């Protein structure tokens, strides 16, 4: 707009210098009208520029406020990020510690399972051994019952043999009396006595064996 005004002034000056008086009057009027329009345009331009400047000032103020707010938010966000980073490190350390604890617990659990398996195997073997022992005890009890019955039979047989021995002793005494009486047949009497003595010795040996057997069974 200023350039156009300068051009108009230059044209006007040139016209004034070259034109006659009526033309000069007309030119002067034209210049006044042009200057009036130019001033109005300049005033409007100034008002417009002031309005734009006011808007720009408001915009700048808003931008500065936004910048301050964003700066504060940035600081808060940075502090929050640092806090989150520290918490993340703590979580990582806690996670590593938990993983180590889980690993240790898993090892302890594996050891406990192995111990349980060993105990179960031991209990199984002990149950088998107990079953065998019970079978052995039952067999020994059966044998003991049999031996007790045999012992009772042997004791009864021993009493019978003792009674027979008493009779044999009585017979021996009677035979000895007969020997004295039967002096007319000494040889036959001696033979009979020898036979009776042999029988008595045989029964005594049998009785001794039965007594030894009874003693062993009692032990």
Image (cartoon, helix red, strand yellow):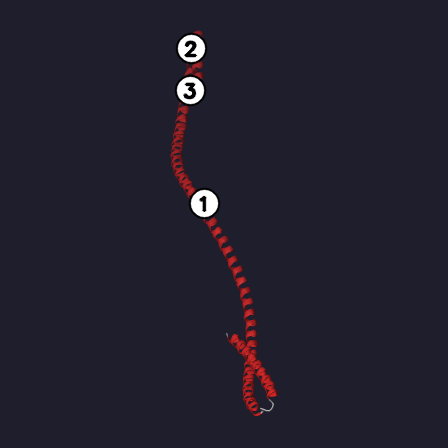
Rendered-image quadrant of the N terminus? top left
**Taking 16 as reference, is 46 above or below it?**
below
Please state the horizontal and vertical placement of residue 206, each as a whole percent of the image: 57, 79
Q: Quadrant of residue 154?
A: bottom right
State the image quarter where residue 165 is shown: bottom right
Figure check: 92 above or below 125: above
- Between label 1 and label 2, give the one nearer the viewer: 1
- SS assignment at label 1: helix
Q: State the SS at label 3.
A: helix
Nearer to me, 212 or 50: 212
17 and 88: which is toward the camera: 88
Across and down, in percent, residue 128 comes to 55, 64
> On the image, numbered disc 3 is attached to which residue?
38
Q: Nearer the viewer, mark 3 or mark 1?
A: 1
Give how far across and how far down residue 43 sits, in percent. 39, 23
Q: Would residue 56 be seen by someone viewing this image from the given angle?
A: yes
Residue contact at pointers 1 and 2, CB within 8 angstroms: no
Label 1: which residue?
96
């Amino acid at each position: 707009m200023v350039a156009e005004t300068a051009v108009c002034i230059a044209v006007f000056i040139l016209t004034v210098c070259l034109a006659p008086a009526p033309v000069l009057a007309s030119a002067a009027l034209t210049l006044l009208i042009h200057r009036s329009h130019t001033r109005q345009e300049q005033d409007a331009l100034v008002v417009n520029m002031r309005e734009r400047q006011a808007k720009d000032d408001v915009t700048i103020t808003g931008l500065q406020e936004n910048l301050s707010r964003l700066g504060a938010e940035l600081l808060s966000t940075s502090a929050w990020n640092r806090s989150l980073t520290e918490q993340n490190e703590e979580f990582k350390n806690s996670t590593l510690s938990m993983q180590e604890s889980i690993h240790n617990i898993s090892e302890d659990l594996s050891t406990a399972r192995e111990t349980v398996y060993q105990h179960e195997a031991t209990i199984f073997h002990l149950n088998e051994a107990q079953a065998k022992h019970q079978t052995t005890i039952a067999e020994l009890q059966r044998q003991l019952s049999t031996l007790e019955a045999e012992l009772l039979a042997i004791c009864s047989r021993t009493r019978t043999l003792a009674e027979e021995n008493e009779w044999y002793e009585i017979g021996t005494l009677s035979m000895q009396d007969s020997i004295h009486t039967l002096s007319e047949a000494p040889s036959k009497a001696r033979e009979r006595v020898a036979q009776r003595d042999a029988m008595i010795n045989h029964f005594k040996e049998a009785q001794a064996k039965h007594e030894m057997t009874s003693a062993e069974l009692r032990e």
